[in-house]
Image (cartoon, grey):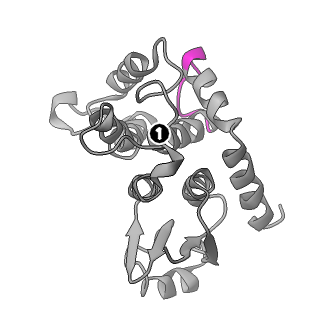
Amino acid sequence: MSEYKLYYCPQTRCRTALWMLEEVGATYKLVPVNVRNEIESEAFAAVSPMRKVPALQIGDELITETAAICLYLADAHPDAGLAPALGEAGRASLMRWMFFGSAVMEPASFDKATGRDAPAGALGWGNWERVLETLHQGLEGKSYLVNDRFSAADVALGATMGFLMNFNMMEKDPLFVSYVERLTARPAFIKASEIDASHAEPA
C-alpha cells in the first residue's frame, strides 16, 4: 500500500486521524494546511471543497470526515484488530458507534450550548439527555464499546467525548471520565498528541 498523505492542521480533528494512523502502524506523511488562514483555506478547496481537515489522500482517492477516515484505516489494516470484519460479531455495533459522535453527539451538544429547543423526535440526533442515556447504556460495565475490546469506534467517539468534556460542553460523569482516561493513556494517542503539539504555533 502506498504512503498515506494526511492534510493536517494542528489543534483540530486532525489529531484523531493522526491517532488512528498511529494505532494501525501506518506509514504516512503530514501535509500542512492552515485552515484558519483564509488564503490557505481557499487554496485547499482544490483538494477538498469543504475546506476542512482532516483529509486523507490514498492514491487518487480522498477521504474526508474523521469517522470515515478511522473506519477506512481499521478495515485497511486488519492486523491491528480495530474493527470486526463484515459478518463478524460486533460489526453492526462498530458501525453504530463510529458515527454516533459526529452524527448525534456534536449536533445535540450544539443545541444544548446554544439553547435551541426542538422536539427530540423531529431531529435525527434527538436531544442531549438521550445522548447521555445512550452512552451510559453503551459503556456501563464495560471498558470499550464493541465486544468490550478497543476499536476504531473508541477512537472516533472517545475523541469527541474528550473534546466536549475538555471544553465543559459535556458532563464529567465518572463513567465517561474513566473511559476517556483509558483511551488517552494509549501510546498511540500520546504520540499523536506530541506530534500535534510540536506542530502547534507557540502561544
**Coordinates of residue 123 in the picture (x, y in percent):** 21, 38
Which residue: 48% across, 39% down?
151
Q: How many marks?
A: 1
Quadrant hosting residue 60: bottom left
**Coordinates of residue 96 in the picture (x, y in percent):** 30, 37
Residue 170 shown in magenta: yes
Q: Residues within 10 Å of mark 1 (few under 14, many from 20)?
A: many
Quadrant holding the C terminus: bottom right
58 vs 25, left or right, is left
Helix, strand or loop status at disc 1: helix
81 vs 100, left or right, is right
Q: In this view, which residue lies farthest toward the right?
A: 202
As rendered, which of 127 and 79 lies closer to the eye? 79
Where is 66 relative to 173, above or below? below
As rendered, which of 196 and 105 lies closer to the eye? 196
Q: In this view, which residue lies farthest toward the front?
A: 79
Q: Most prominent secondary structure in the magenta stretch?
A: loop
> Would you name the residue on which mark 1 appears?
157
Which residue: 69% across, 54% down?
192
Which residue: 49% across, 43% down?
81
**Coordinates of residue 87 in the picture (x, y in percent):** 24, 40
Segment tinted magenta in the rendering: 167-175
